[in-house]
Image (cartoon, grey):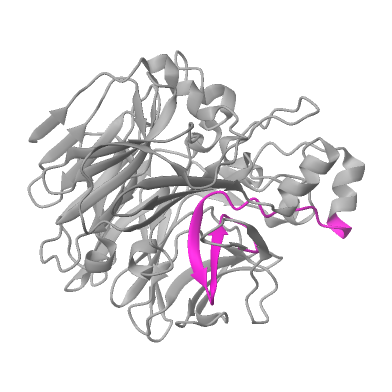
Amino acid sequence: MNEENSTISCGVDSDYALGFSDQTMEWTEEPAILTGRIPDWLIGTLYRNGPARFNLPDGTKIRHWFDGFAMVHRINITLDRITYTNRFLETDYYQESMKRGKLWGRGFSGWRMSPWKKLRSFFQPLPLDNTDVHFANLGQDMVALTEVTQPVAFDPETLETKGHSRFRDNFKDPVMGVHIHQDPVYGGWLDFMVAYGRQSYYHIFRVRPGETRRELVASLPVKKPAYMHSFAVTKRYAILVEPPFRMNPLAFLLGLDAFIDSFHWEENRDTTFRIVDLQDGTEKKLLGHPLFCYHTVNAFEDGDKIILDLISYPDSSVVHAHDINRLTDLATWPHPPPRLERFTLDLATETVTSFYASQTLMELPRINYGRCNGMPYQYCYALIASTGHFSDGLIKWDSKTGREWKIQQKGLFPSEPVFVPRPGSTEEDDGVVLSTALCGEKKTSVLLVLDAKSFTEIARAELPQIIPFGFHGVFNLKQDLNQAL
């Protein structure tokens, strides 16, 4: 394995915990301090989504990272300056909690209420709309997403919340997947949703360009649904990676548990790869070894085989390792290793084989999506993780040669890298990689601008405050869906 590294000091490792502190200040078009040179063609907006508040007025501390109140960050890049704007999403979950001064609503994990309130919530559902993970376009709306039933729309310029953005169809509010994909058949986008009930279903659906109505591609019955955060597509197939992290829907439907607390790891169960033909909706199931997965990287077809790259964990313990207290205890945090694993799904022999494609621990992978999604590809950009904390640097991985480029700076804790192609580019890695990063030395966040080909820093912009550790970002979502996924 070939590696190239860049190492510069930017504070100390103990500053990592600052990424989980509350950030309640909201800024509007605040100029950033730029060093280096931004490419002339890089004009647009980077949006970031993630939790930004974990403490409430009554002293309650939100227990799980994913339950922090959602905030959208907007970094606008023009020829002569970079500006920063941020807003809390005014969701029902946020507004009711702020009005009451205490946590109100059903969260992702660690939900604790009295039996009476749980019973009442079954008849009068509590807010479940803390959309703090990703973004999509829905009709004319830009929306924020998480594993909830309703996306939340916001103004892409001011970031003001517009309310729930609703689909114009008859599905009874199933839980949607977070990572949409461009539809290789009709354009628009694809996703999956889970309908929980006595008989549960995975519904794979498409939304045609400019529409807000979901069209079914396939309905897959399942007795005990698995937790799936993302999926993969090729030019012909959608692939659901169904881990042995399953739920009995009754407890969740009756309001007895928070969402993720309804799932349990089943040690003796395999992972099921559910492969659906996007043309006719037919399905084939293949079995592989037990694993847990948040994020797929890419998939493509090779004759009768599907090559699928994903970030795998040995089990689901990583979900509860994201408890805030455990995340910020650097001495004892037991982070399960996130490994880049390549699977071969052989449709002819109905077999599954795999190997670890890199020894580097990594998460939050991104590719040149518009050019390579569902197709053979060469480069992946990701966050370097470790057993001490999840943000150790950035990596570029070459899937053909195994070569790796790394940027690791002491006290600098990056976010997910977002690849932006240079207009008119003909090479897969011709562009820049954008990442916001906590800089412990200056007690603020910076925007890193990396040349994607050499994987070296060409500019950085000092932002007016810390952006708490979040999840996903998009560049110029309203203008180019290919960059939004």
Q: Is residue 344 above or below residue 246?
A: below
Figure label count:
0
Identified at 68% across, 69% down, the residue is 173
Nearest the viewer among 291 and 459 is 459
Q: Quadrant of residue 429?
A: bottom left
The vertical placement of 466 against 239, above or below, is above
Numbered range of the magenta stretch:
122-151
Q: Position of residue 131 (x, y in %)?
A: 60, 53
Residue 402, position in %: x, y? 11, 44
Q: Nearer the viewer, residue 213 or 87?
A: 87
Residue 322 shown left or right of residue 108 in the figure: left
Q: Kindly tell me whether residue 367 is visible in this rendering.
A: no
Q: Nearer the viewer, residue 87 or 368?
A: 87
* Residue for point 30% across, 50% down: 80
Quadrant (top left/top right/bottom left/bottom right) for the N terminus: top left
Up the image or down, 417 lies above or below 234; here it is above
Q: Between 397 and 196, which is closer to the camera in this rendering?
A: 397
Residue shown at the point (18%, 52%) measured from the top left: 379
- Is residue 133 visible to us here? yes
Left or right of 174? Residue 437 is left
Q: Main secondary structure of the magenta part?
A: loop
**Which percent across, then down, holds residue 304?**
20, 73
